[in-house]
Image: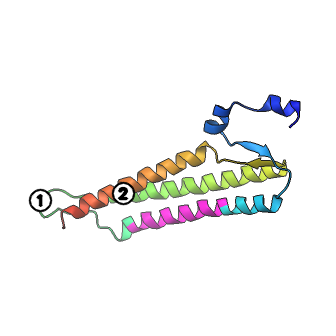
Amino acid sequence: MSAEDRGKIKPLFYQRWLGQIEIDNEGSTARDYLARERNFLGWLKLSVTLVVIGTAFILHFNLGGYSSDGGVMLSRAEGKVLSILFYVLAFVCVVAGVSGHLKITSDLRAHKGFAQSGALAHLVFVAVVVAVATASILIIVRNQGSI
């Protein structure tokens, strides 16, 4: 790295929490392009999985009715809200994948490499984990009355 490049380096906390860590890319371009494609396809696969889960809430899980002890179970409206949540998360995953793909493509053209995904990927990951955990808990609570 030249002295000019060292002056442009942002603090580590900025790189770690607010953006991607960038490194010089002197070679291995084919590997980087394949990694970029694999990363995009991973986002696409996650979004398709979330759409399937959302559709399963609409088609398969009948979230209305009453449990055997008279308690109210989840309504169909709540099931629709869960499915819409998964559809929105799927759309966010596609947007995150496309934006990451375009950013990495422009970075590779400028001969920059990437060593870590940015904050958007981390936020989407946390949102997906929370949504799946919430849906799992709701399904378990729903099925406890039928055991």
Q: Quadrant of the C terminus?
A: bottom left
Crowding at dot 2, Cα within 10 Å, few <14 / some 14-19 / many 20+, comes out as some
**Magenta part, dominant SS:** helix
Magenta stretch: residue 54 in it?
A: yes
The residue nearer to you, when weighing 79 against 134, is 134
As helix, strand or loop, the secondary structure at mark 1 comes to loop
**For residue 70, side relative to residue 117 (left or right):** left
Q: Amino acid at mark 2?
A: Ala
As helix, strand or loop, the secondary structure at mark 2 comes to helix
Crowding at dot 1, Cα within 10 Å, few <14 / some 14-19 / many 20+, comes out as few
Q: Is residue 51 visible?
A: yes
The residue nearer to you, when weighing 35 against 88, is 35
Q: Earlier in the sequence, mark 1 or mark 2?
A: 1
Q: Position of residue 30 (x, y in %)?
A: 81, 62
> Residue 128 has which mark?
none
The residue labelled by disc 1 is 70
Q: Amino acid at mark 1?
A: Gly
Start-end of magenta stretch: 39-56
Q: Position of residue 54 (x, y in %)?
A: 43, 63
Magenta stretch: residue 111 in it?
A: no
Residue drawn at x 77%, y 61% as measured from the top left? 31
C-alpha gap between disc 1 and disc 2: 22 Å
Rendered view: 108 above or below 52: above
Residue drawn at x 68%, y 43% as measured from the top left? 20
**For residue 83, side relative to residue 71 (left or right):** right
Rendered view: 11 above or below 134: above
The residue labelled by disc 2 is 135
- Residue most extreme to the bottom: 60
